[in-house]
Image: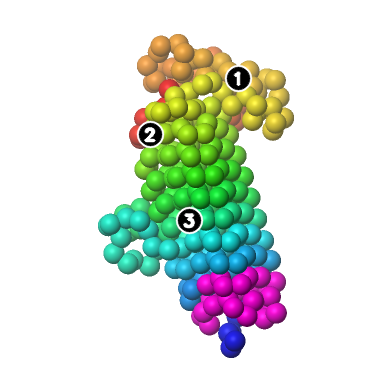
Amino acid sequence: MNVMLKGVQMGKIHATALVSPQAELDTDVEVGPYSIIGPKVKIGKGTRIKTHVVIDGNTTLGEDNTVFQFATIGSIPQDLKYKGEDSQLILGSHNTVREFASLNPGTEGGGMVTRLGDHNLLMMYCHIAHDCIIGNYNVIANGATLGGHVVVEDYAIVGGLVGIHQFVKIGTGVILGAGSMVSKDVAPYCNATGDRARLRGLNLEGLKRKKFSKERIEALKKTYRIVFQSGLRTKDALERVLREVPQTIEVKQVVDFIAGSKRGICR
């Protein structure tokens, strides 16, 4: 197998793997049996590609990622408007992509890039569609589907079989219950579930696990009551929050998220 790869040790590429000579693999990258790596793919050091994985397109993986068998990364978007533009798929570092997960690159109509940050867990059969932007430390559970142009901030948990509509934004620290159909933006630190998804309060368990102080949690509780339970119009509720609630980082995140929502807020 005569492959020119950047610093890679050939013993770590299985003899049955098909790796394009134009691909760029950094040091200590492992490629398992029968996996296929396309010519525009770049893979950072320490990343492990298991058996029967396909990585194609203009795709970049950072360092120390693990991609399990039968995952498909970088195949063309499932979008009829896609006309072959050289869009990108970019994964950060320390991500885990489990079996049969699929990730598509961006499109001309959505900024030309699908991007994932660091330390994300993508479980079996989940799908990340074109032009999605995913932050850090998120868990996307089995069978969850993110439509095109979805944004997921940080530390969110997307339950099994969840469907997220195109252009929806999921705030940091959100938890979405299994089987939820999410058609509107979900504000940071909230718990939403159902078809169509509705708020069920704050993600209190997540806040406690991250060791939020009692004062920070109380500020979020008061913000939640004013915005979602007072009956005030959104503009008036946000103004009241600014007047009456301690302006912690988390409260500011909630206020800014709601004020900037274009699709409407899940309630």
Q: Name the one closer to the observer, 51 or 114.
A: 51
Q: Residue furthest bottom?
A: 2
The quarter holding residue 140 reads top right
Please tell me whether mark 2 or mark 3 is closer to you in this view: 3
Going by the image, does 4 lie left or right of 229? right
Do the residues bearing badges 1 and 3 touch, measured as CB atoms within 8 Å?
Answer: no
Membership of 26 in magenta stretch: yes
The image's mark for residue 219 is 1
Residue, disc 3: 102
The quarter holding residue 48 reads bottom right
Question: Where's residue 172, x and y in %?
Answer: 55, 36
Residue extent of the magenta highlight: 7-36
Q: Name the one closer to the observer, 230 or 237.
A: 230
Question: Where's residue 206, x and y in %?
Answer: 64, 30
The image's mark for residue 183 is 2
CA distance separating discs 2 and 3: 21 Å
Which quadrant does the N terminus fall into?
bottom right
Q: What crowding class fits label 2: few (fewer than 14 Cα within 10 Å), some (14-19), or many (20 or more)?
A: many
Going by the image, does 177 lie left or right of 206? left
Residue 10 vertical position relative to residue 108 in the rendered view, above or below: below
Which quadrant does the C terminus fall into?
top left
